[in-house]
Amino acid sequence: MKPSIYGLTRKALLEWTLEQGEKKFRATQFGSGSINSVLEHLKK
């Protein structure tokens, strides 16, 4: 099972993103995407 990034703090998400070989700005994109996903789920 893959770990979920939904429960990560902003700092932990940044660290995880860098560990994956991505650039810092990707952490913001991942964070925004996960928030939008949660909001869409809550609307249903």
Image: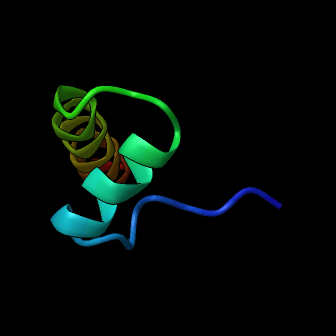
Res 11 quadrant in image: bottom left
**Residue 6: horizontal and vertical position, in percent?**
40, 62
- So how many labels did they put on this image? 0
Res 12 quadrant in image: bottom left
**Residue 42: horizontal and vertical position, in percent?**
30, 57
Q: How is the image coloured?
A: rainbow
Residue at the image position 34 percent from the left and 70 percent from the top: 8
Task: Give 13 or 43, whichever is nearer the viewer.
Answer: 13
Whether residue 20 sits left or right of residue 18 in the image: it is: right
Residue at the image position 56 percent from the left and 61 percent from the top: 4
Residue 19 appears in view: yes
Against 14, is 25 above or below? above
Against 43, is 27 above or below? above
Res 28 quadrant in image: top left
Task: Give 40 or 19, whichever is nearer the viewer.
Answer: 19
Whether residue 28 sits left or right of residue 5 in the image: it is: left
Against 15, is 17 above or below? above
Whether residue 13 sits left or right of residue 11 in the image: it is: right
Residue 42 appears in view: no
Q: Quadrant of the N terminus?
A: bottom right
* Residue lying at the far right of the rendered structure: 1
Residue at the image position 74 percent from the left and 56 percent from the top: 2
Residue at the image position 23 percent from the left and 45 percent from the top: 31
**Residue 30: horizontal and vertical position, in percent?**
31, 37
Task: Give 43 or 15, whichever is nearer the viewer.
Answer: 15
